[in-house]
Image (tube, rainbow, N blue to C red):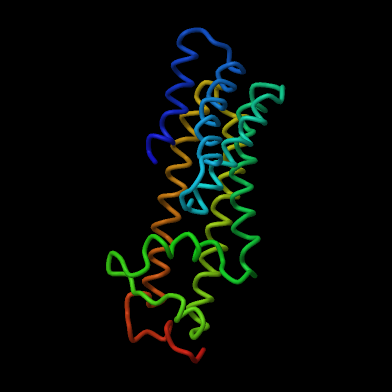
Amino acid sequence: MLAAIGLPPLLFYLLRHFGLSLYASLVVVAVSTGAPALYSLLRPGGNRHVMTTYFSFASLAAVALAFIPGSPQFLLARDALITAGLGLWFFSTIGTKRPLAYTLTKPVLEGRFHWPGNWETHWHAAPRFRRMWRVSTVGWGCGFLLDAVLRVLLAYNLEPDAVPAATTIMYLSTNLFLMIASNIYYIASGMFNPRSALFSASTG
C-alpha cells in the first residue's frame, strides 16, 4: 500500500530530474499507475475488495484526466477530483443498506484484533450500532472532501515541483487522522464494551 502511494511521486521526481516536462511527467506517472489498475480489473477470477476496485477505477480516471491540457496548476489540481469523488462516494452510501465505513471495515476487523464479531446481528438488532457507522461514514466523507479542497489550494500556491510530494504527505496525513479519529469515536461509542448500549436493541 505504501509503495503504491510512494512510487508515483518518486517516479515523477525521477522524470523531472532527467529533464522531462511537467506535463509529460504527469502523463507518464498516470499511465504507469493505470496499467496495473487495468490489469487488476480485467484479470479473471478472484474476489476483489470494494476499495481495491474503486482505486483501480480511480487510477484509470487519472489516466484520462492526465491528457486534458491546462496550466501547470490545473494539471496538478486534477487529482482533487479523484479525492472529491471518494468523499462523495462515502456520502452517497449514508442512506443505503450498508454505509461505506461499515462495508470497508467489516471484512478487515470483524472478530479480529480484539474487535467484536457478529456485526450483522448487531446491525439488524441495534439502532445505535447502525447510527455509529453512518456517522463514521459522514466523517470520512467530510475528510476526503476537505482533502480535495486542500489539494487545489496546494496546487495553486506551491511551486509546481513541490506539489506531488506535498499532496502525498497530505494524503497519508488525512488517512491517518481519519483512522485515529474514527477509532476514538468507536471506542467512545462502546465498540469494545460487550455490555455497551451500542449493542442494545433499545435506543434508550
Query: Which quadrant of the structure image shows residue 30?
Result: top right
106 to the left or right of 92: left
Query: Which quadrant of the structure image shows residue 112?
Result: bottom left
Residue at 63%, 32% in the rendered image: 77
Residue at 60%, 30% in the rendered image: 155
Question: Which residue is at the front of the view, 110 or 151?
Answer: 110
Q: Is residue 93 shown above or below 162?
A: below
Question: Which residue is at the front of the view, 54 or 133?
Answer: 54
Q: Quadrant of the N terminus?
A: top left
Residue 96 x/y as whole percent: 63, 69
Residue at 62%, 30% in the rendered image: 63
Q: For the view shown, which residue lies furthest in the top direction?
A: 19
Q: For the view shown, which residue lies furthest in the right direction?
A: 69
Residue at 57%, 63% in the rendered image: 138
Residue 22 x/y as whole percent: 58, 17
Question: Which residue is at the front of the view, 181 or 200?
Answer: 200
25 to the left or right of 116: right
195 to the left or right of 5: left
Residue 24 x/y as whole percent: 59, 16
Q: For the view shown, which residue lies furthest in the left direction?
A: 114
* Count of marks, rendered view: 0
Residue 104 x/y as whole percent: 48, 59
